[in-house]
Image (spheres, rainbow, N blue to C red):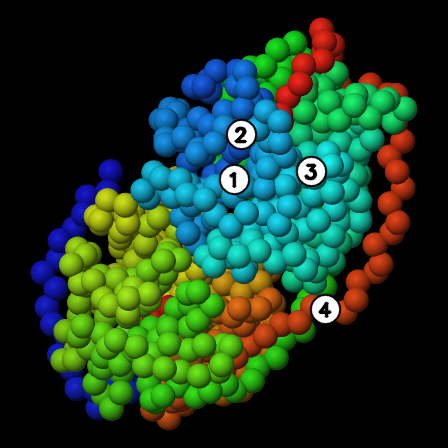
Amino acid sequence: MLIPLVFAICAIPFALAQQGRFKQKARQFQKAADQSLPLRSPASVLTPDLSAWTIVAPYPAGAVEAPCVGSDGAFAYSAAGYVGGPSSATYKYNPVANTWTPLAPVPAALSATRGVYAPNTNSFYIFGGRDRINVLNTTYIYNIGTNTWSAGAPMPAGHYFPGVVYYPGDGKIYIIGGFNTSLAEDTETYEYDPVANTWNTSRAPIPVGMGGAGASIVGQYIYLAGHYGTGTGSTDHYRYDIVGNTWASMAAVPVPIYVPGAAAIGAQIYIFGGGNPLIGPSARMQARIGASIRVPATSYTSTYIYNTVTNTWTTGSNTNVAHSFTAGTAIGNGLLVVGGYNGSSDTNVVEMATSTPTATPTPTATPCASVGSWTEKAPYPIAVSGHSVVSQGGNVYSFGGIVNNMAIVNAYKYSPVTNTWMPIAPLPAARGWFTATSDGTYIYLLGGVDQIFNTTATLWRYDPVSNTYDTSLPSYTIPTYFHASAYQNGKIYRIAGAAIGSDFHVEVYDIATNSWSMAANYPFANHNLMAVALGSYIYAGGGNASPDKTYRYDPSTDTWDDAAIADLPEGRSSAASGAYNGRWLLAGGDVNFVISNSVIAWDPSTNTWTNLPNMIQARDLLAGATAGVSEPGAFYAVAGSSASGTGTNDNQQYIETPCGTPTPTPTPTPTATSTATPTATATATPRIIPTPRPRPTPAPRP
């Protein structure tokens, strides 16, 4: 158990005129110390091995078909589904305690719907589905922090059994395919902005209509596996490039499959359960429509694993019972499948399996890279370094910093649309060398130094709507500056930093309970490090101590993993850091303790670092954020310190455009009706009674 340590932190008075000598000595000391640390193995790609499936606590609503299931990385959320009829029941599953907790019900009873968790609003979203009669276009939003539901902007058209995923690279949710109001499989690709509550219908459609596909996301790619087809199930498998806005046909699913559970862990995609309607293209229209919303003739216990790097399928362990018309999700390194039809009846059986990562050499092939470039935009109103920058609502916000050897209170908002900066309410007190992070509604400002360079532990909350600050939030335990911070799943993480020397503690602020707690320590004392939240994890690395080391933090297990992310190509600290196009982007900073304009990005789908175009100006003690109202958005590196050690006011913008036109997507060949029995690993449970029944379905460094 972690025991919080309370330190009597003294003020840190020092003459700024001596900082240059202090920095140089500190860098020399850290560089010498880092040379004695053990080195990590070369970059790797995670190849998870799947454990046996284990039956866990049953679904509390009883036997259920096709509930709506998603995860915030620590818990699973399940809502709606068919429980003797469309249901509004909502539950949270705790995999550690193996318990289900009832939550506020959905405002309407639904079935045949799909949903996903969005970390930028800490909410669970449900899109479309059916009531007893109609195909719906509803959007329902469950706020995890307040345990309340609200209605979002309706979908552009009603759909049931669509594919739904969240892309952390742009903070958008993608709703793809499904059955439309004409009860036909659709090709539409919708993009939903959970922050702005708006829809974009301009995305490229799927080459074929796909309803009831297994939908997953790895990096910037969405994968749709299997679908209803002509009533026989389908082996179709398509990949959507979010950045390039293009579709490509991938290796076929081993068996025709419909409404399986689907999830991604690392670079692997898991398709588990599902079924095969076996209606046949010659069946009457009414029969084929009915087969899309009722139990299939064949139910699977199979698990298929797709390697996104090699474009190949393998088989995993079978579930204990068959799960067709089901749903599932990943919780950290675990897979969860909830209910479904077992071949003779609906079931309340819930099962879990665990993916155990093993390292394999990184493949030499590299994906098509987007083309990026830097431009100077409207300069920052003042020359500054050591400030904090964050994006929200398509705009960039910058607070405080160091000007003329003194912390300041100035704050500004930048609009990418008008390319202008405007002043906002000044900070409650001067701050420098601190961090900012956003939960999608508010901006949180953590610690730093005050005007006389006392180290602080304050937590302030800025409301962009009212342009006001709330200073009543509790402070954290250990005052720090030059720390890193990140927002994940309703919580804010303060990671390491400079206190009396360097600090290794990680403190967690729970927004819902308005309280701080200690998490697992960072692997060593460090400051001037960078961090980012991507998917269900937080990634941190660089800094003045061991500046090439990187780590992944898993909130669901409270552990830091050294092998989950490749080390930095070169030691780096005090860089602008942020998520951009599904990757971790680091711009400028000190590279091997020399101020730099180099830019690199880490791609979680390949676990590799790539060099990007250099910044126009070399900067350290700068800050960055991704913002914009159009795709793919832009990364902004704002102000910072020049090589001479003085603050600057340049505002450098990085934008990527899709790479060269990919090979045209081949015209899909209709999947032939399968007469073969699925392989032994895809154990099929035949439907015993075929009676049809209608179913609605970063801070810088010293």
Label 4 to label 3: alpha-carbon separation: 36 Å
Q: Report helix, strand or loop for mark 1.
A: strand
Residue in the image at 55% along x and 47% along y: 154
Residue furthest top as drawn: 689
- Give residue 685's position: percent from left, percent from top: 70, 13
- Depth check, mark 3 against mark 1: the one in front is 3
- Give residue 497's position: percent from left, percent from top: 28, 65
- The residue singled out by tag 3 in the image is 181
- Give residue 571's position: percent from left, percent from top: 46, 71
Q: Is residue 686 above or below residue 217?
A: above
Label 1 to label 2: alpha-carbon separation: 10 Å
Depth check: give the residue in front, 479 or 282: 282
- The residue singled out by tag 4 in the image is 659
- Depth check, mark 1 against mark 2: the one in front is 2
Q: Amino acid at mark 3?
A: Thr
Q: Earlier in the sequence, mark 2 or mark 4?
A: 2
Q: Amino acid at mark 4?
A: Cys
Q: Report helix, strand or loop for mark 2.
A: loop
Q: Which mark is residue 126?
A: 1
Q: Residues within 10 Å of mark 3 (few under 14, many from 20)?
A: some
Depth check: give the residue in front, 172 or 537: 172
Q: Which mark is residue 110?
A: 2
Q: Report helix, strand or loop for mark 4.
A: loop
Label 2 to label 4: alpha-carbon separation: 41 Å
